Image (tube, rainbow, N blue to C red):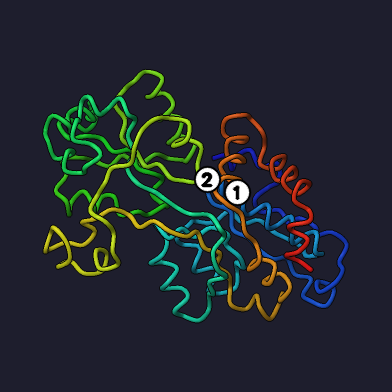
C-alpha cells in the first residue's frame, strides 16, 4: 500500500495551478487539498488527479495524511479529496464518515482491490494444505513460517499499522498459531518479500493488488472463509460464535471520497474527480516503473498525462 520519499515536491507544498480558465475562474482560488498516503499507487493516483485539476486552473496542495484518520480532516473541510479508499480495509471508516453527511463518496476509481495473506509457491512443500487457511493451524506449518522472534508461532508480516485490516483480530478469532509483525513502510514490506524470494526463505505477508508483486512472483493468497459484512459486525456469524473477523478480507472497489463542501466551493473540481477513472493494468504498469525501474512518481505521472490528454481533458470540460 512506496515511494513517498521519491516525491519531488514537498507533500505539504502548495502547487500553483495552470492559468485559471473555464469553471475554475468563477470558483474559489483556495487550494484543493488532496491526501497522500504511504503506498506508490495512491501517490500516483493522487498526483494524476492533482495534475488534472491544475490543468483546469485550480491550485492544489498535497497533504500527507493517515489512511483512516484522514476522515476527521475531510469532515471538517481541512482536507478536501482522498483518491483511494479501499473496500478491503477502509469501508467501515468510509461508511461512518459518509453517514455524517460531511463526507461524500464520489464513486469508484475503476481500480479493483484485493488484499490478503500471500505466500510464495515454494512454501507449499512445507505447508501442503495451502491455500486453505486451515493448513496454517497445523503446528508444522506454523513452524515453517516461524522466526526466532515468533517461534513456535508462525510469523505473518502485516502492512503498516495505519492500514488497518484486522489481522490480529482474524488470528484470534480463527485461533491461528501466528503472530503479526507489522512492516514499518510499504517499501519495507516489499523489500522483505524480494529478499525472502531470492533466498527461498519462508515468508507469509500482506500483499495487495493492483501491484507488481503478485504478477512478478509465483504464489497465492490464503483462502480464508469468505467475507460478508456480518463477519465483521456480528460475532455470532461464522466459525467462531463469540468473535467477529473470523473470515477473510473483502474484495472490491477502490473509492474516491471528498469533503461534502467541495461541491459548492469547487463544483468543477468535484465533477472532474467523479469522472476520474483508471484500471488495474494501467496502475500496475506505473507502479512497476516506480518500484522496480527507478522512475520517480513525478516522471511517471507526467508521462501518463502526456499520453492521455484526450482522456483527462474530458474530465474537466
Cβ atoms under marks 2 and 1 closer than 8 Å = yes
Q: Position of residue 260 (x, y in %)?
A: 58, 77
For image coordinates 72% across by 46% down, the residue present is 304
Q: Is residue 297 above or below residue 100?
A: above
Question: Is 53 above or below relative to 258?
Answer: above
Report which quarter residue 281 is drawn in.
Answer: top right
Quick check: 286 left or right of 157? right
From the viewer's perspective, tell me whether residue 27 is left or right of residue 87: right
Q: Position of residue 127 (x, y in %)?
A: 20, 30
**Number of callouts in the render?**
2
Number of the label disc, if any, that sits on residue 39: 2
Which residue occupies the foreground of this view, 256 or 180? 256
Residue 43 tag number: 1
Residue at image coords 20%, 56%: 246
Camera-side residue of 61 and 23: 23
- The Cα–Cα distance between marks 2 and 1, rounded to whole angstroms, is 7 Å
Viewer-closest of 251 and 191: 251
Q: What is the quadrant of the C terminus in the image?
A: bottom right
Amino acid at each position: 500500500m512506496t515511494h513517498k520519499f521519491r516525491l519531488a515536491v514537498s507533500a505539504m507544498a502548495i502547487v500553483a495551478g495552470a492559468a485559471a480558465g473555464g469553471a475554475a475562474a468563477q470558483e474559489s482560488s483556495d487550494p484543493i487539498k488532496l491526501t497522500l498516503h504511504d503506498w506508490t499507487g495512491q501517490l500516483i493516483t493522487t498526483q494524476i488527479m492533482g495534475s488534472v485539476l491544475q490543468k483546469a486552473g485550480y491550485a492544489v496542495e498535497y497533504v500527507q495524511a493517515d489512511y483512516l484518520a484522514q476522515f476527521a480532516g475531510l469532515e471538517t473541510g481541512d482536507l478536501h479529496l482522498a483518491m483511494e479508499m479501499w473496500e478491503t480495509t477502509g469501508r467501515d471508516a468510509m461508511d461512518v464518515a459518509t453517514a455524517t453527511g460531511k463526507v461524500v463518496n464520489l464513486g469508484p476509481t475503476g481500480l479493483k482491490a484485493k488484499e490478503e495473506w500471500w505466500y510464495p509457491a515454494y512454501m507449499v512443500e512445507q505447508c501442503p494444505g495451502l491455500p486453505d487457511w486451515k493448513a496454517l493451524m497445523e503446528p508444522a506449518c506454523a513452524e515453517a513460517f516461524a522466526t526466532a522472534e515468533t517461534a513456535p508461532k508462525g510469523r505473518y508480516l502485516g502492512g503498516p499499522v495505519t492500514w488497518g485490516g484486522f489481522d490480529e483480530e482474524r488470528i484470534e478469532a480463527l485461533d491461528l498459531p501466528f503472530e503479526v509483525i507489522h512492516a514499518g513502510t510499504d517499501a519495507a514490506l516489499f523489500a522483505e518479500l524480494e529478499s525472502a524470494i531470492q533466498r527461498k526463505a519462508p515468508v507469509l505477508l500482506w500483499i495487495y493488488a493492483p501491484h507488481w508483486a503478485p504478477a512478478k512472483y509465483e504464489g497465492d493468497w490464503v483462502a480464508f472463509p469468505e467475507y460478508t459484512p456480518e463477519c465483521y459486525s456480528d460475532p455470532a456469524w461464522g466459525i467462531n460464535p463469540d468473535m467477529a473477523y473470523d473470515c477473510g478480507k473483502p474484495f472490491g472497489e477502490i473509492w474516491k471520497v471528498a469533503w461534502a463542501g467541495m461541491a459548492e466551493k469547487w463544483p468543477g473540481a468535484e465533477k472532474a474527480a467523479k469522472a476520474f477513472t483508471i484500471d488495474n493494468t494501467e496502475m500496475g504498469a506505473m507502479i512497476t516503473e516506480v518500484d522496480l525501474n527507478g522512475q520517480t512518481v513525478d516522471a511517471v505521472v507526467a508521462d501518463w498525462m502526456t499520453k492521455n490528454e484526450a482522456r483527462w481533458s474530458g474530465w474537466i470540460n
